[in-house]
Image (cartoon, helix red, strand yellow):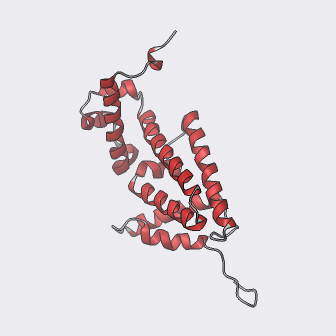
Amino acid sequence: MTTERQRPLRADARRNRERILETARTAFATEGLAVPLDEIARRAGVGPGTVHRHFPTKEALFEAVVREHLEQLTLDVRAALTEAEAGPAFFAFLAQMTTEADAKQDLTEAVTAAGGPMGAATEELAAQLRELFGALLARAQQAGAVRDDVDAADVQAIVVAALTAGRHRGTNDGPGRLAGIVFDCLLPRRTNADGTI
């Protein structure tokens, strides 16, 4: 027997859900997890009950927004894997990921695990993204564009360091310049003629 949850959403319900997600995306991006569900409902122009029908908790709504980001990043990393130049593709994706994380506190919180535990489907998507990113990193390392003594977890920590450095400086130009400086540590180490680094 088909349950209500399994039925496709009516057009108006689908529009409401999309409006709530769009509003939440903006709210979480600028305010993090502090914004209440009722405030998201007000900004979306729907009643609190409408939000709760689609997303029973703020965590469920947060997870839906994070899942959208993960899905887009997965598409982007797949595209990067098809680029002819492995090094530039890796660093371009890294810069994009860092810029998006800087602009969207919700994604940053997900990266640093501040958003709390995610559901199985989201965890699976995150694991797939990590695997694809690992492949992108390995490809860049094989091309000699990235030092070979780092792994994907190291790179994630470096992204967080770049974001933290940018916020600590409080500059208005985003993480771009400082991220570039931080990412330089991923370049292959140059060895002098006498064997020193």
Q: Position of residue 113 (x, y in %)?
A: 53, 47
* Vertical arrangement, residue 112 with respect to residue 38, above or below: below
* Vertical arrangement, residue 103 with respect to residue 7, above or below: below
Residue 181 placement, left or right of 23? right
Please tell me which residue is depicted at 43% across the width and 60% down the height of the picture: 99
* Vertical arrangement, residue 33 with respect to residue 48, above or below: below
Q: Which quarter of the figure has residue 127?
A: top right
Please tell me which residue is depicted at 59% across the width and 61% down the height of the picture: 155
Residue 80 placement, left or right of 169? right
Please tell me which residue is depicted at 46% across the width and 19% down the height of the picture: 5
Please tell me which residue is depicted at 67% across the width and 60% down the height of the picture: 138
Q: Which quarter of the figure has residue 193?
A: bottom right
Q: Position of residue 12 (x, y in %)?
A: 30, 24
Is any atom of residue 49 visible in this view?
no
Is any atom of residue 104 visible in this view?
yes
Q: How many marks?
A: 0
From the viewer's side, name the closer residue of 111 and 186.
Answer: 186
Taking the view exactly as shown, the residue that stands out farthest to the top is: 1
Residue 13 placement, left or right of 178? left
Q: Position of residue 161 (x, y in %)?
A: 52, 64
Residue 63 placement, left or right of 29? right
From the viewer's side, name the closer residue of 79 and 170.
Answer: 79
Image quarter where the C terminus lies is: bottom right
